[in-house]
Amino acid sequence: MSDPWGPPEDDEFGPRKRREPRRGAAANPAEPGAPGPAAEVPSTSTQPTSPPRATLPNTPAPLTPAASGAAPAAAPASAGTLDAAATPPSPARAARGDDATAAAPARPKLRLDDLVIRASSHTPFFGVYLATHAIPDALCMCHASVGCKVKTQHHLVEHDGVADAHNRMRYSQFIDEDLISGSTHQLEEEIVAFQARRQSQVVVIDSSTPISLQAQPMAHVCARLEQKTGVHVVAVDARNYDADLWEGYDATIATLLDRQTWPPLAETAADEVAILGLPFDRYEPDQQGTVAELRRLAHNLGLQAKAIWLAGEPYATLQQVVRARHMVLLPWAQGRTERALRAAGRHPIRAGLPLGLEGTDRWLRGVAAAIDATADKPSGNGAAPPPRFGERAERLIKHERGRCKELYALAHRRLSGRGFALFGDAPRVAGVAALLMEVGMVPVCLGTCHFSLGGRAAVEAMLRAHHGRTLPDGVHWLQDPTPHELRALADDRAALFDVHGQLQPPPPGAPLPPLCRAEVAIGTTLDRDQLAAARLPFVEFGYPSERAHFLFPAPWLGSNGALRLLERVLVALEGVR
């Protein structure tokens, strides 16, 4: 970070002038009628007060503190004592019914591990940046000083081997004086200059924690910048101190949707569907293939999916969302995005993941049933039209199962009875676990991260509702684990290797470590690094995957995605023989 009081530096725009100290009035005085401080953004799991939403059959109800079995908060601890059991969860976690805290045994005192950086420590600040990265003609203006936040970009730089993850972002480089005076002069200068250079079609302002705590109104700043640049400029209000990566991703989608001009529902296309919440994190063929697979499924249902949020496609393509009559929400967009769509007069459909045979079947049936239920009634006797999309869904399901039958049989012969360990966010853990169980594999260890999407209770609910599966007894669970907990899990298995590298049984009377029952592990690069001592074949999946890259379409959703994931597990296991 440059010294604001040192010699001026040059950058790509030429010599940089030292900013003159601002004394007296702020550079941007409040205009008449300017709004007051922004209100706190509600948690993504807060239930909307709007009419009941169109929901897929058997969709699990959102978790609440009562439903998750959370006990009432204990009395405050005595002064000078950090008592985790007596400290109520944050408002956001309480509203979510976060089972990672509610179901965990009470700890008498706060531990050092409770403060350690873990996989879920990616904040909404990075989630906004990740969402902006998925729009190729967007500019992400980080309203922050350059510092340790740059380190989180390293994961995305290594994860995405096609698109540079740093050339469409800029830091406003505010200093203490900016924070005190509330001036946005430097921010506006940077946006105008960099937008002109990049020819960006949309600008997303991503605020760091000090800025979000300041609650400075940004509406007038965005309006001025739109006049200067001629493109949409939005500021995403995401609480970096009480949320995680995927809440920032969801907030970005919702904020951009709020900026669209929505026609009346009657003027939209009845055969168009928008799919929102796809976690598009790189421009490699795995994500491109997933986008193509979602469009293939929609097309075979008789629907056009022109706008998929997000899909690595230009902002103009995303703006076609306003033409679609039907809105399908994946689990990563069922908070603020849902509320934004309802405010626009739309009726979003909550869906699980089309992953695995049963998961894809239920996704197709659920989407088709929800669309048929909201179809316009014909004039005349007022009877509902025949279930047009439902019939197509059944024909498509029959075709997909017939196409995959022999390949699933091959996977079942090779994988049945073999144990697996799986780590990731709750929707992916539920989907991949269901897929592997379909071919006879046995879950022995499951770990969830990114608490906004839920923990064990959320995974079990998704398995039942979206995949028709229940977990066997004896599964070892880790919820929002620390690096130390993951390393300890690996060390327990590593301790049983002999000098020849052969895994031996534990001493008489000693329990069998959980990972000793697994033959393969699946998770992100972060999980792989922490579990290295376990010497398990590993399949990188999710964000970040810094060592797994693709040169040919490799989807992870839909029927084709299921086959591709099974192939990766087969290759990982057969490679150790």
Image (cartoon, rainbow, N blue to C red):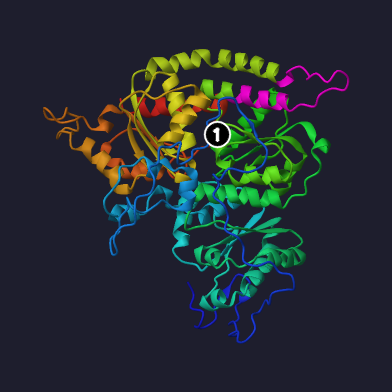
Is the residue 194 above or below the residue 315 in the image? Answer: below
Q: Which residue is mark 1?
A: 552
Magenta segment boundaries in residue numbering: 363-389
Give the tally of numbered discs: 1
In the picture as drawn, the residue positioned furthest to the bottom comes out as 23
Q: Residue 536's image quarter?
A: top left
Q: Is residue 229 left or right of residue 138?
A: right
Disc 1 crowd rating (10 Å Cα; few below 14, some 14-19, many 20+) is few
Instruction: Decide if residue 130 is on the left or right side of residue 386.
Output: left
On the rendered image, what quadrant is the C terminus found in?
A: top left
**Picture layout, residue 441 above or below residue 308:** above
Does 377 lie within the magenta span?
yes
Magenta-colored stretch includes residue 133: no
- Nearest to the observer: residue 513 or residue 555: 513
Identify the amino acid type marked 1.
Phe
Q: Residue at x 15, y 31 (%)?
A: 510
One can see residue 466 in this view: yes
Q: Position of residue 228 (x, y in %)?
A: 75, 67
- Under circle 1, the secondary element is loop
Q: Residue furthest left?
A: 508
Q: Position of residue 297 (x, y in %)?
A: 64, 26
Picture residue at 51% right of the left edge, 69% below the top: 145
Q: Is residue 379 left or right of residue 40?
A: right
Say which quarter of the image contains residue 560.
top right
Residue 46 placement (x, y as % from top left): 56, 45
Q: Residue furthest front?
A: 75
Quadrant of residue 306 within the rendered picture: top right
Q: Position of residue 105 (x, y in %)?
A: 30, 42
